[in-house]
Image: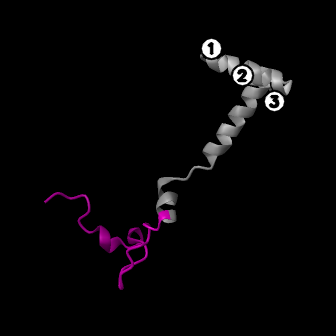
Amino acid sequence: MADHRISVRIPEHLGERLRQKSQMKGAAESEIVREALESYLVKQAGEHSAYEAGVAAGVIGCAKRSGMPKDLSTNSKHFKGFGKSE
């Protein structure tokens, strides 16, 4: 698989920090950037959707009344008149 090449402009202070890190690790600046990007993308993949956050917070499914279906979207009678203006 061929490498994907990009060009990125960064502020001078960030470039200096990158150069210092590169020298300390004895690695190319491009390797440091690849590691940082990989780390960032892995962290982003760990984010949750709004639904997952709602489930974790306990607000999804918290209205449990007797006689109510678990999921209103599965029962067509709850859609009677939905989307119609009076």
Residue under numbered circle 2: 18
Residue under numbered circle 3: 1
Residue furthest to the right in view is: 26
Q: Is residue 81 above or below residue 1?
A: below
Q: State the image coordinates of residue 67 (x, y, percent, origin top left).
A: 35, 85
Q: Residues within 10 Å of mark 3 (few under 14, many from 20)?
A: few
Q: Is residue 40 above or below residue 69?
A: above
Q: Which residues are magenta?
A: 57-86
- Secondary structure state at the residue bearing disc 3: loop
Q: Is residue 5 above or below residue 59?
A: above
- Secondary structure state at the residue bearing disc 1: helix
Sooner in the amino-acid sequence: mark 2 or mark 1: 1
Instruction: Give amino acid for label 3.
Output: Met
Between the residue at mark 2 and the residue at mark 1, the CA separation in whole angstroms equals 10 Å
Closer to the camera: disc 1 or disc 3? 1
Q: Split into 4 quadrants, where in the image is the C terminus?
A: bottom left
Residue under numbered circle 1: 12
